[in-house]
């Protein structure tokens, strides 16, 4: 009774420790998850490049603060409806990033609501629609350039960074020329509105704003009115019917059923092949294999392959190993020297001994048997020579 009572706690304690370990691990994972969730969703959100509220190096919050200090009201609109409301009944400058989800008509209608439009992430389609057929050019690798035009903002700013270059369309003024292309394009419409395009990543971000005349150029372009509407496009702003087509829309109707059929066939084939192998057989390790079984197995492989030369090489190797020990030679003595030592011991021809131990090449099973007999006779002769030396007179 005493033994049974005392053994119970010994079996319970390891289980209790294991349970406590798993509970501790679960609590640690829960704590890490809570901390990660707090960091991701607890008031901190990753902003995109050129975002007016981002303090990151590629954000533009510094420019927004400078504009506000200049008395300019900056409204951040994160969807098209908010941008349209902010542009209603007042003269404002629309800061527009690339908006591929908007159709040409919607893009033009949104620009018509603003007094001025500034494209800070120009793309070929936007340039073609709003700047009379202009297009993208090369890239100046953020090289500083002189204004090269008479527009007020570039002339006041002086030298500034260019970044992405553009090719002006008909009636469009180009500034900051680099190799025949321009870092800033500007045009005035028939109703007096101004549309300007420049690479905001090279001139307006928190990192590039202090360089050269970038700050003066950005303020001169954006502060032409007392209000700025900074539109950050959203995927939900896409026009009805302009949603990009998915892969399912672009492929024929039979593709999806065909893929499903192939997957089902693969699963059935895997189950079929798996059942053919049968259940797994467990075997306790280590497995002991007798030496004679290994030898017989190798002999069967040599016989099946018909490789008489390889089989003879194995016989020769074993014979040389025994002769080395018998002659008292080093374990790594070359085979030629072993053959010469045997010839000297027996007083036989070295060429004949080398033929037996090294060079003879059997081609048939009969030759292999004859060669093995010669090896046996040679080894017997060496043993007999040593036995004769030990005979007392």
Image: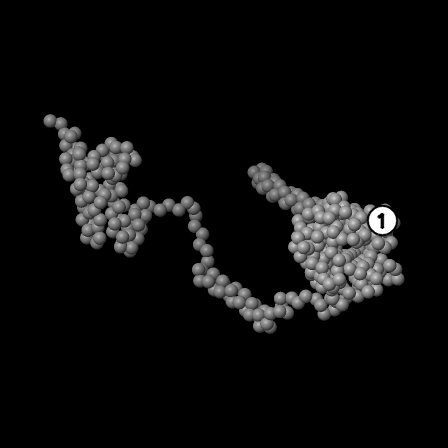
**Quadrant assignment for the C terminus:** top left
- The vertical placement of 156 against 125, above or below, is above
Placement of the N terminus among the 4 image quadrants:
top right
Q: Is residue 188 left or right of residue 30?
A: right
Identified at 74% across, 46% down, the residue is 159
In this figure, which colouring scheme has been used for the structure? one colour
Q: Residues within 10 Å of mark 1 (few under 14, many from 20)?
A: some
- The furthest residue to the top: 393
Give the image location of residue 101, x and y in percent: 72, 63
Regarding residue 355, the answer to whether it shows in the image is: yes
Residue depicted at 21% across the width and 38% down the height: 339
Secondary structure under tag 1 reads helix
What residue lies at 71% left-to-right and 59% top-to-bottom?
168
Residue 12 position by quadrant:
top right
Residue placed most toward the observer, 187 or 233: 187
Q: Position of residue 256 (x, y in %)?
A: 59, 69
From the image, tell me which residue sits under label 1: 68
Seen from this angle, which residue lies furthest left?
393
Residue 377 x, y percent position in the rendering: 17, 42
Do we see residue 114 in this rendering?
Answer: no
**Side of 253 relative to 164 (left or right):** left
Q: Residue at x 24, y 38 (%)?
A: 336
**Which residue sits furthest bottom?**
253
Above or below — where is 249 with respect to 200?
below
């Amino acid at each position: 009774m005493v033994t049974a009572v005392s053994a119970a706690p010994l079996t319970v304690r390891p289980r209790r420790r294991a349970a406590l370990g798993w509970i501790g691990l679960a609590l640690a994972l829960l704590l890490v998850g809570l901390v990660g969730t707090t960091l991701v969703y607890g008031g901190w959100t990753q902003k995109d490049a050129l975002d007016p509220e981002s303090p990151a190096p590629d954000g533009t919050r510094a420019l927004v603060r400078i504009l506000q200090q200049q008395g300019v009201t900056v409204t951040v609109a994160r969807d098209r409806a908010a941008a349209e409301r902010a542009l209603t009944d007042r003269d404002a400058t629309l800061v527009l990033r690339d908006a591929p989800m908007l159709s040409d008509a919607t893009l033009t209608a949104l620009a018509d609501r603003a007094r001025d439009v500034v494209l800070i992430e120009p793309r070929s389609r936007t340039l073609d629609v709003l700047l009379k057929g202009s297009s993208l050019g090369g890239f100046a690798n953020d090289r500083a350039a002189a204004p090269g035009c008479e527009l007020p903002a570039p002339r006041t700013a002086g030298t500034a960074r260019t970044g992405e270059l553009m090719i002006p369309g008909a009636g469009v003024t180009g500034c900051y020329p680099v190799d025949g292309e321009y870092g800033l394009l500007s045009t005035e419409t028939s109703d007096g509105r101004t549309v300007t395009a420049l690479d905001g990543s090279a001139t307006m971000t928190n990192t590039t704003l202090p360089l050269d005349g970038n700050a003066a150029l950005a303020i001169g372009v954006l502060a032409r009115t007392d209000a700025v509407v900074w539109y950050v496009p959203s995927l939900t702003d896409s026009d009805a019917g302009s949603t990009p087509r998915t892969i399912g829309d672009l492929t024929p109707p039979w593709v999806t059923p065909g893929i499903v059929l192939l997957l089902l066939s693969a699963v059935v084939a895997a189950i079929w092949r798996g059942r053919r192998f049968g259940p797994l057989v467990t075997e306790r390790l280590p497995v002991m294999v007798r030496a004679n079984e290994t030898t017989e197995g190798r002999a069967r492989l040599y016989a099946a392959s018909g490789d008489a030369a390889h089989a003879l090489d194995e016989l020769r190797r074993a014979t040389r190993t025994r002769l080395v020990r018998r002659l008292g030679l080093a374990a790594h003595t070359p085979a030629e020297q072993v053959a010469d030592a045997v010839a000297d011991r027996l007083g036989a021809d070295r060429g004949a001994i080398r033929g037996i131990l090294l060079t003879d090449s059997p081609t048939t099973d009969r030759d292999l048997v004859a060669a093995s007999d010669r090896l046996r006779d040679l080894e017997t002769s060496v043993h007999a020579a040593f036995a004769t030396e030990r005979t007392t007179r």
